Image: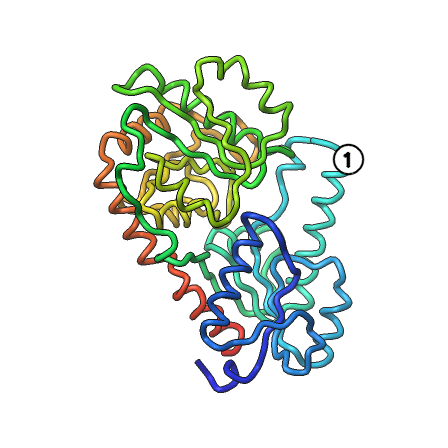
Amino acid sequence: MTAESRSASICILPHLQGLGGPASFRARLVQGLESRGVRVVDTPNDPNCACILVIGGLSRMQVLWQARRRGIRIVQRLNGMNWIHRRRFTNLRHFLRSEWNNFVLSTIRRFLADRIVYQSQFSRTWWHTVYHSVKASSSVIYNGVNLAEFSPGDPSQIPTNRYRILLVEGRLGNGYEMGLENAVRLAQQLNGTLDRAIELKVVGEVPPDLRAFYEPVNQFGLINWHGVIRREEVAAVDRTAHVLFSADLNAACPNAVVEALACGLPVVSYATGALPEMVQCDAGLVVPWGSNFWKLEPPQLPLLVDATRRILFNQPQYRLGARKQAEATFSLENMVDQYLNVLFG
């Protein structure tokens, strides 16, 4: 750690609340920075504020313009961008909000950021393809977790009378219903073909109308609607499953995947977004979508079913591989080191 990072402070904007995504990232980064003696302040107006980390976008961009004029370094952390609304219309409000968010993100990236952190190689390529390159230098830093907090648990916690497929999302809706649809189809295809029953455990907010739509499918208990959980409960839930199905399409670096791997929970998914970067060797399996996922064309199911079956039948191999992948790539210590270098380097 440099002398500057020990004496200076950073401001992380915006201030986020909630279970997953940016809120989880912010809480973990603050924990890691403060453990290194780096002070996190609430406002860029703090006299010791040397840099600002913008998590995505910020509606009050004048704050960043003022900070830039004062010579404060601005680092923008970028996920992906909003795109589903252009393929599957939900409502006008959601469409306009998505377009506005893209405008804000791209404006900060082009005109205000001194450095940009992309969450994955996929994210960087996507932004460069759609909005082209910018003058600001960039880095790729994957999300990380505390590997002591997210760790493999007691194998006796995993059910032996059924195979549990876990789906963890903050919210399923606003055009992202396809992820749940793919998970249900996977569970249906596997159920009755193995030596145990299949349970699809869905963690996160599911709109009532979407749950009602699947009630005919769920008459024999195929789907376990677990609901919203607290951040500190995620690891315990991960430790009770056999495999995580990553449902998000073109995800930049989903926290649910990082957390699952750290708990020794293997991941199965379609090969979209950053998943091929994140799930390698024996950490799980990713399979081709089989059609044009950018146009939301239906995926091919048989390869996903076969991949899930392989993971279920080779649990020790894949559970060990998942943990090794997390230790090599997704530790909180490594993430904090890289952010310190970008913020104060």
Is residue 96 shown above or below 23? above
Q: Give the percent coordinates (x, y) of residue 87.
A: 64, 33
Is 143 displayed left or right of 198 in the figure?
A: right
On the question of residue 286 being in view, the answer is: no
Residue name at image x 67 percent, y 36 percent: 86
- Which percent across, then down, holds residue 6? 50, 82
- Which residue type does callout 1 highlight? Leu
Residue 341 location (% of width, % of height): 47, 74
Q: Is residue 210 left or right of residue 262?
A: right
Question: In this picture, is 125 found above or below 242?
Answer: below
* Residue at position x 39%, y 31% in the image: 165
Name the residue beneath numbered marker 1.
92
User: Who's the residue at 44% across and 80% down the image?
Assistant: 1
The residue lying toward the viewer, choosing from 317 and 27, is: 27
Where disc 1 sits, the SS reads helix
Asked whether the viewer can see residue 194, the reply is yes
Relative to 341, 262 lies left or right: left
